[in-house]
Amino acid sequence: MYHQYPESQKVGLKAEEEFAEAARRNGYGVRKSSLEENKFKHIDLWIDADNKLLSVDVKAKKKVARSSSQLEDRWMLVEFKNVAGGLGWLHGEADWIAQRVDGGFLITGRESLLELCSGLVDNKISPYPDSTRGESKELYRRYSRTPWGKKDEFGYILSSDISENTKDFRLWEMEETECEDPFGF
């Protein structure tokens, strides 16, 4: 499948693999989603947790600026609309969003995250910052890249906003051989 930024895709696939491996080490059954489920429902993995099937959309750390060499876990990119103008992953069908952070994953219910982001991120669309003019991204602003032919809408929140403002978040700390159970069934 074509991806405009293969390095970004590689980082995303690695995060999915890390989450799946941690789930298997915890005794969960794991199934990768179909291409259709991934593309249209925003589901990366299915987790069998004590005969309860849970869908997860895994998010990798991202660079705040494409030119940066550092992957960031303090900020989280949240997508309201995708580049084609369709519903973004916040409006997908995943039960859980798992954001890769240092040492593990920050997991929260997708609906809780959507509610949080709808309150935190401005509804007014701002033009995407031009880094060549010294402009930088701001937290809680809704951006679109329509001048570049993209119909997306997204913003940035702090990862700590999730732990401070949602009731169903879990920090799944991972060690080399074992990790704490994030779903608690």
Image (cartoon, helix red, strand yellow):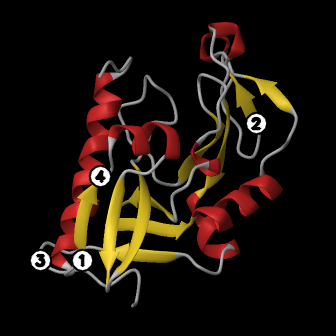
Q: Which residue is mark 4?
A: 16
Q: Height in image: 117 above or below 139?
A: below
Looking at the image, is mark 4 or mark 3 nearer the viewer? 4
Q: Secondary structure at mark 2?
A: strand
Are there few (<14), some (14-19), or many (20+) residues within 10 Å of tag 2? Answer: many
Q: Is residue 75 visible?
A: yes
Q: Which residue is mark 3?
A: 177
Q: Quadrant of residue 164?
A: bottom right
Question: Relative to residue 38, is residue 9 drawn left or right?
Answer: left
The amino acid beneath tag 3 is Thr
Tag nearer the camera, 2 or 1: 1
Tell whether label 4 touches label 1 (CB within 8 Å). Answer: no
Q: Measure how far apart labels 2 and 3 are at the Cα level.
A: 40 Å
Which residue is painted at 57% across and 45% down in the image? 89
- Which residue is at a point 29% across and 39% down the rendered structure image? 11
Earlier sequence position, callout 1 versus callout 3: 1
**Residue linked to disc 2:** 142
